[in-house]
Amino acid sequence: HDANTERSSEGTPFPDITGLWAVSVPDDRCYLFRWRQAADARRFEGIQLGVGEIRHGYVTQSGVVRWCSDGKKWQGQLDPTGWCIRDGCCLSITCGDCLWNF
């Protein structure tokens, strides 16, 4: 079986974002995440280094990536290379306010 065709009924693979990701924010802080794609390819699990596990990790076929960690909700768009997340934002889970864009 071809793993890519099993990932989607249309035969188009979901982006595999397994690995170590760094998110840099405007105040020069960097957040590190280690992700592992789940068997269904739509979900991922992992940790935010120094903080703890992530929740609700999800990637769409079009490359939208969403996850929750440390009281924040993160979202961004994978660029065509699959190596970079662009047009990202981080929202407070408690109040929904935008904390920053990345």
Image (spheres, grey):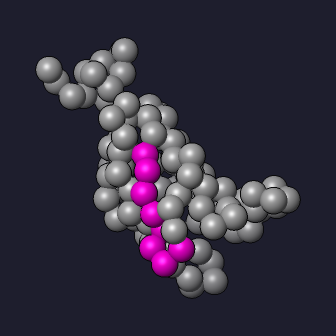
Q: Which residue lies furthest to the front in this view?
A: 52
Residue 50 counted in the magenta span: yes
- Where is residue 17? Give x, y as percent: 36, 49
Determine whether, in the image, residue 6 is placed left or right of residue 68. left
Q: In this view, does 101 lie above or below 3?
A: below
Tell me which secondary structure the magenta stretch mostly adopts: strand
- Point out the residue furthest to the right here: 95
Whether 65 is drawn above or below 11: the answer is below
- Horizontally, residue 69 falls left or right of residue 7, namely right
Residue at 37% in and 15% down: 9
Q: Residue at x 85, y 59 (%)?
A: 95
x 51%, y 47%: residue: 57
Quarter of image, res 15 = top left
Res 10 quadrant in image: top left
Against 10, residue 80 (above or below) is below
Image location (x, y in percent) of residue 25? 59, 74
Task: Residue 77: tell me if it is visible.
Answer: yes
Residue 6: x, y in percent? 27, 22
Magenta part of the chain: 44-51
Q: Depth check: give the residue in front, 67 or 46.
A: 46
| Quarter of the N terminus within the rendering | top left
Residue 33 spot, x, y in % from top left: 44, 66
For image coordinates 38% across by 63% down, the residue present is 34
